[in-house]
Image (cartoon, helix red, strand yellow):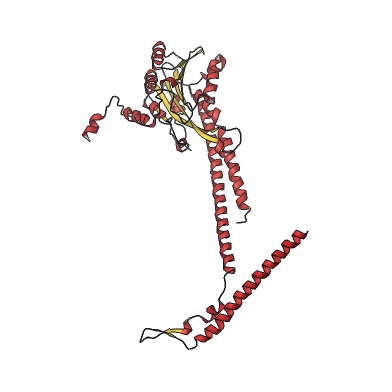
C-alpha cells in the first residue's frame, strides 16, 4: 500500500473541482485509448473570430504547430474562439495525441472537466455509447463560467432502407468558457467524424460576416446551432421504431389471443441584461418541451411494445393448451381400468405382509382384454380407411 502511495503524483489538485485529481482521469484516458498514438493523424481546427466578425481558421497537425499558434494568438475582446477535435469515426479515438490535447487545454485555461469530457470519445469495439448518459456540469466565478456536456443524438447512417439498424447513436462533446471581462467565448468541440453536420454548419456561419454577426449577439447561441441540427432526427428515429413495433403488434393481435438545464437567467445576470436572458431561457425551454414530447412518444411506444409482448405470450399459452388438448384426444382410454380399478383385485396380508390376489381377478381379464383389443382393432380399421380414402383422392386427382 505504501509503494502505491509513493507512486501517486499530485501534480495538480483542486478540491473545489468535480475532478480534483487529474492524474486519475489521465490514467483512464490512456487505458481507454482516448487519444491517438499516430502523430500523422493529428488534426485540430482552430478558428478565431474578431469583434468585427472576421474569422480565421488554422489546421494544426503537430505539437510544434500547436505551440507556435498558441504563442501567436491571444484572447480578443468581444471575440469568439472555436476549437474542433474530431474522430475518424465514432469507433476510433480522437485525432489528437495526449501532448497536443494538453497544449490545447493549457492554452485555453480549461478546467479538468474538459479532460473528463474526452473520456466518452475512446476507441470502441462494441456500440457502448447507446447506454451512456452524461450530466451537464456548470461552474461559475467572478472571472468566467464554464459549461460542459455530452449531446447525444440519433444519426441515420444508411439511406438504402429505413430499418431500425440503419440508425446509430452518436455523441458530440461541448465545452464553453466565457470570459466575463473580455466578453469572449471559447468553445472546444469534440465531434464523432470529420463530416459532422454541426461542424460544417458552424464553419459556414462563422465564414459569413452577416451570419457571424447574428451568432455573436449572445454567447450561448452556438448551443442552439447544435440542438437545431440534430433534434429533429429523434422524430424520425422514433418513427422508424414505431413502425416496427406496430408491425409486430398487428401480427400478434390478429392471432386472436424532466430535468432542466443548469444554465438559466440567474447565471447570465452578471454579463447580460434580463431581456436577453429571457430570450435564451425561452429558447432552451422550447427545447425542454421538445425533449418532453419525445420522451412521451418513447413511453407510449414502450407501452405498445409491452402490450404486444403480452399478446405474443398469451398466443403461446393458448397454443400450448390447444396442443395438450389435441394430444389428450388421441390417447387410448383404457376405460375398464378407470371403471374397475386395480384395488379390488389386490390386498395386503397383514400377517405375512404379502400381496394376495383376489379370486375374482379373472373378471378384470375378461373385461379388459376384449375391450383393449377392440379399441386397438377399431383404431387400425379407422387408420386403414383414412389411408385408402387419401389414396383414392390422389388417384382421382391424377386422372383429372
Mark count: 0
Rendered image quadrant of residue 119:
top left
Between 394 and 359, the one nearer to me in the picture: 394
Rendered image quadrant of residue 67:
top left
What is the residue that sits farthest to the right in this orientation? 400
Between 399 and 360, the one nearer to me in the picture: 399
Residue 115 located left or right of residue 316: left
On the rendered image, what quadrant is the C terminus found in? Answer: bottom right
Q: Is residue 184 among the parts visible in the rendering?
A: yes
**Residue at position x 54%, y 54% in the image:** 313
On the rendered image, what quadrant is the N terminus found in? Answer: top left
Between 12 and 212, the one nearer to me in the picture: 12
Q: Position of residue 242 (x, y in %)?
A: 59, 42
Q: Position of residue 287 (x, y in %)?
A: 53, 32
| Up-down relation of residue 217 to residue 160 (above or below) | above
**Residue at position x 57%, y 47% in the image:** 304
Q: Position of residue 22 (x, y in %)?
A: 33, 27
Residue 78 located left or right of residue 166: left
| Up-down relation of residue 318 to residue 287 (above or below) | below
What is the residue that sits farthest to the left in this orientation? 2
Q: Position of residue 244 (x, y in %)?
A: 59, 43
| Up-down relation of residue 349 to residue 246 (above or below) | below
Amino acid at each position: 500500500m505504501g509503494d502505491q502511495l509513493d507512486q501517486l503524483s499530485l501534480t495538480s489538485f483542486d478540491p473545489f473541482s468535480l475532478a480534483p485529481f487529474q492524474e486519475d482521469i489521465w490514467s483512464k484516458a490512456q487505458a481507454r485509448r482516448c487519444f491517438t498514438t499516430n502523430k500523422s493523424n493529428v488534426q485540430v481546427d482552430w478558428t478565431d473570430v474578431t469583434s468585427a466578425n472576421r474569422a480565421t481558421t488554422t489546421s494544426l497537425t503537430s505539437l510544434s504547430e500547436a505551440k507556435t499558434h498558441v504563442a501567436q494568438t491571444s484572447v480578443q475582446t468581444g471575440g469568439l474562439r472555436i476549437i474542433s477535435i474530431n474522430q475518424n469515426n465514432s469507433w476510433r479515438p480522437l485525432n489528437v495525441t495526449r501532448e497536443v490535447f494538453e497544449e490545447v487545454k493549457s492554452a485555453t485555461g480549461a478546467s479538468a472537466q474538459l479532460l473528463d469530457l474526452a473520456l466518452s470519445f475512446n476507441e470502441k469495439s462494441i456500440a457502448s455509447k447507446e447506454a451512456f448518459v452524461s450530466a451537464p456540469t456548470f461552474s461559475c466565478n467572478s472571472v468566467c463560467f464554464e459549461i460542459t456536456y455530452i449531446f447525444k443524438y440519433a444519426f441515420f447512417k444508411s439511406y438504402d432502407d429505413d430499418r431500425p439498424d440503419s440508425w446509430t447513436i452518436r455523441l458530440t462533446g461541448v465545452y464553453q468558457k466565457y470570459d466575463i471581462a473580455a466578453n469572449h467565448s471559447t468553445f472546444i468541440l469534440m465531434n464523432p467524424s470529420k463530416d459532422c453536420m454541426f461542424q460544417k454548419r458552424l464553419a459556414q456561419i462563422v465564414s459569413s460576416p452577416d451570419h457571424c454577426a447574428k451568432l455573436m449577439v449572445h454567447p450561448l447561441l452556438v448551443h442552439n446551432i447544435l440542438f437545431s441540427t440534430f433534434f429533429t432526427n429523434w422524430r424520425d428515429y422514433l418513427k422508424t421504431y414505431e413502425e416496427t413495433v406496430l408491425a409486430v403488434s398487428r401480427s400478434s393481435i390478429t392471432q386472436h389471443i424532466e430535468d432542466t438545464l443548469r444554465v438559466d437567467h440567474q447565471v447570465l445576470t452578471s454579463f447580460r441584461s434580463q431581456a436577453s436572458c429571457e430570450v435564451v431561457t425561452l429558447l432552451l425551454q422550447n427545447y425542454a418541451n421538445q425533449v418532453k414530447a419525445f420522451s412521451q412518444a418513447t413511453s407510449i411506444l414502450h407501452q405498445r411494445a409491452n402490450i404486444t409482448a403480452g399478446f405474443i405470450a398469451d398466443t403461446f399459452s393458448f397454443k400450448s393448451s390447444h396442443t395438450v388438448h389435441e394430444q389428450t384426444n388421441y390417447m387410448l382410454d383404457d376405460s375398464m381400468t378407470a371403471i374397475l380399478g386395480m384395488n379390488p383385485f389386490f390386498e395386503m396380508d397383514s400377517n405375512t405382509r404379502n400381496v394376495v390376489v383376489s379370486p375374482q381377478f379373472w373378471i378384470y381379464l375378461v373385461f379388459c382384454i376384449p375391450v383393449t383389443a377392440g379399441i386397438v382393432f377399431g383404431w387400425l380399421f379407422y387408420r386403414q380407411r383414412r389411408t385408402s380414402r387419401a389414396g383414392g383422392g390422389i388417384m382421382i386427382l391424377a386422372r383429372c
